[in-house]
Each structure stands twice: as C-alpha cells, then as structure tokens.
Amino acid sequence: MIKKHVKKLSFFLIILCHLGFLAAIFFENQNNIFVSAFIILSLILLRVTYKKTPLSSGSHSFEHVLTVAFVFFGAILTYVLCTSFGLSSVLSASLVGLIASFIPDFFKKSVFIQGMPTAVYCGAFVGMTNINVATDYVFITLASAITGLLLVGTKDTFHGVGGKLGTLAFGGVAFAFFITYFISQWI
C-alpha cells in the first residue's frame, strides 16, 4: 500500500516539475507566439504520456538505498570537477557519465550494477547545477538525496520517455532550492 502511494507522489512531483518548467518558459517569453504554440503542443504530448504511464508498484528491496548513493556519487563528483578543477559543467557530467558507463563491464553478473550508470548520470545532472544556486556541498547533498528518492519512486515509470533523468535532477534541485530558501527565511 505504501509503495503505491510513493509511486503516486513521485508521479505527481514529476508532473509538477514538468509544469513548472513549462511555466518558467512561458513567463520568460509571453510575447512569442511560437513559444506559446510549443508549450501548448508540449502540454498535449505530456497529457498523452501521463495517460499511458502505468503506476505499477514494483519491489525495490535494498537497491533503493544504493540508487540514492549512486545519485549522490555522480552529483558530488560532477560538482567537484566543476568547482575544484575548473571544468565546465557539461564536460564534468560527460566525464562522470563516460566513466560510469564502463563500470558494468567489470561486473557482468550483477543485475543491479547494470543499472548503476543511470543513477550516476542522473546525479551528474544534479552536479551540473550553477554555482550561484548550489553554493556548497550541503545543497548538492540535499538535491541529490531528493533526486535519488524521485528516481527510486519512478523506477518503473516513464520507460522510453526522453528527459527522465534531467527532469528528475531539475525537480531535485528545485525542491532543494525551495527548502534552503524557506529555511534561510526563518533563520
């Protein structure tokens, strides 16, 4: 029963991320008719995708803890490459993704390790966050934890839909930003 609620909550958070992203595009380009047409077309396509996405609740067992850890690893490694070594965020994420893609070749018998590059690459998207937004490692840790939980919650959904990892990273960073913003307002 809890798994079904986690799936529904994760699915709802993904919908909020998509709508927030489209709303940000719309408000930045209100006077452009082509952007408005693009947003309308995107909303129609998202509606079709949401309708066809099953909300089955699969078993996660121990792998969900490792998935969150792999997202954290990808985020921290990308963030370190950006901030400490001065590499661009795109190059940093590419290097992390490239290295992670070769790891399953060393552990061919492990079914879980075969899916590990996906979690690491999702974390690499989190690590690409602008330094003005992600000012320290605490923010990256919080954002990667939220993103990892979203990734676990949407494990069996959105297969074959492009942009899942980027959307999850966007959602994790956005929620982490709102959490840190509200905490900073109280202090």
Image: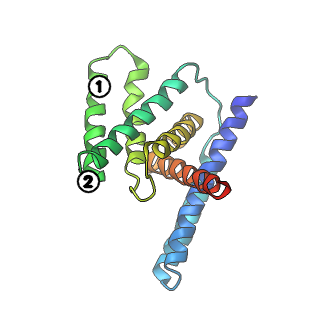
* Chosen colour scheme: rainbow
Q: Which residue is mark 2?
A: 88
Q: Residue furthest bottom?
A: 31
* Three-letter code for the amino acid on which mark 1 is drawn: Ile
Could you say which is closer to the camera, residue 151 or residue 39? 151
Q: Is residue 11 left or right of residue 30?
A: right
Taking 47 as reference, is 74 left or right? left
Say which of marks 1 and 2 sits in front.
Answer: 2
Query: What residue lies at 49% left-to-right and 83% top-to-bottom?
Result: 33
Disc 2 secondary structure class? loop
Q: Where the C terminus falls, by quadrant? A: bottom right
**Which residue has dot 1 on it?**
103
Image point 56% across, 71% down: which residue? Answer: 40
Q: Quadrant of the N terminus?
A: top right
Q: Is residue 5 left or right of residue 100?
A: right
* Mark 2 closeness class: few <14, some 14–19, many ≥20 residues within 10 Å: some
Mark 1 lies on a secondary structure that is helix
> Who comes first in sequence, dot 1 or dot 2?
2
Residue at x-position 51% and y-position 47%: 168
Inspect the image, locate mark 2, and give the three-letter code of the amino acid beneath it: Ser
Q: Residue 156: percent from the left, percent from the top? A: 56, 34
Q: From the viewer's perspective, is residue 81 above or below residue 111? A: below
Q: Is residue 160 above or below residue 69?
A: below
x and y percentages locating residue 142 in the rendered image: 53, 42
Task: Looking at the picture, tell me which residue is in the foreground, 93 or 29.
Answer: 93
